[in-house]
Amino acid sequence: MRWFRPLAIGAALVLLGRPAPAAGQVASRLHVTTPYPSVTVAPGEEVRFDIDVAAPAWTPVDLRIAEAPEGWDATLRGGGFVIGGVFTDAEGVAQVQLQATVPTSARPGTYRISVVGSSPAGTNELELSLRVSKVERGGVSLTTEFPRLQGPAGATYRFDLELRNATPRDAVFDLQGAGPPGWQVTVKPAGEELATSVDVEAGGSSSLSVEVDPPDQAEAGVYPILVQAAGAGLTAEAKLAVRIIGNYGLTLTTPDERLNADVAAGKPTEVPLVVVNDGTAPLREVELSATNPTGWTTEFRPETIPEIAPGDSARVVAVITPSEDAVAGDYVVTLRATSAETNDEVELRTTVKTSGLWGLVGVLLILAAVAGLGWLFQRYGRR
């Protein structure tokens, strides 16, 4: 008899104290369960429960929220939709999610949500307990040891922040930062380049990196930066500041931007110069200096400029005196303007020309030679 063998095996297992295995481990009746049926939440927070529905394989299960506090928004979701039932899979288990939003006006206390499942395998009710606590609000914080940084406009400023999740549940926080118009603020988890959100476990923390890039021509002043982390119905903010002390820039040139001059040996020649402040911060105590050919001297009037405001310029005269024995030709004089923060230099090509007196002497010598030759021809030419 074929029916006798399975019966005998089952009887033998019972006698040995071991239960007979269920085929595929499928539940014999309906079960609606969740790993964490009791949680603590805060007013205004959104909470999610992962619910397992177990029933005999290929069994339709109707689901409904039988009880929820007045004014609370509670829905059952699955596959991205609001649902009213599931169909258990071949393993006999299906997963759905209960999503509930706690009103901001909810008072401290314990609230109940009931989910009921109905199927041919029976009916089962899941009771969820939510304890609303005012203490939990504000349980997310953003902190830093150095909320204010300073430097020039061309620099990039980096802040290190800590995001702490003091709530009783894990949460994903969206990160964003804002600064003045034209400023670029980037907020990301430390060690990441492209992430714009971070997952922080309950009671844990995560390190954030904030990069602030101001415009190159930002004027001196203090600029506010706001960083936000939003998640689990809560928002944490950090107020930072960057103090721009100015961008330093200096240009040394001539009024017509020509960098050449004609000079005479042993004689001083005045060369006009312009020192331009093309930065965003004042330049103070700008000193003028030069590197000369051997035996040459260069003096400046004035030698030091007390201050040049951003966008302004100052006039300077360089007095260049070649050596007495300088021969005709081209020479290079390096002119330099230097402040405590920056400097600039130009090479001035100078051309030494022979004196007009020597030219006249040369002409007279030539005329004298010609006259002498003419006298010789007149006296001895007939012989």
Image (cartoon, rainbow, N blue to C red):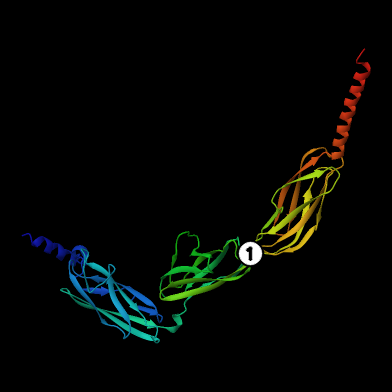
The one nearer the camera, 25 or 255, is 255
Residue visible at 52% across and 71% down? 226
Label 1: few (<14), some (14–19) or many (≥20) C-alpha neighbours in 10 Å? some
The one nearer the camera, 104 or 273, is 273
| Quarter location, residue 128 | bottom left
Q: Is residue 357 visible?
A: yes
Q: Position of residue 350 (x, y in %)?
A: 76, 44
Mark 1 — residue?
151
The outermost residue toward the top is: 383
Screen quadrant of the C terminus: top right
Viewed as shown, does residue 278 lie left or right of 181?
Answer: right
The one nearer the camera, 242 or 141, is 242
The outermost residue toward the left is: 1
> Measured along the vertical axis of the image, is residue 58 above or below residue 268?
below
Residue visible at 89% across and 30% down? 365
Screen quadrant of the N terminus: bottom left
Q: Is residue 145 visible?
A: no
Viewed as shown, does residue 216 lie left or right of 260?
Answer: left
Residue visible at 32% across and 74% down? 49
| Element under disc 1 | strand
Q: Position of residue 257 (x, y in %)?
A: 69, 51
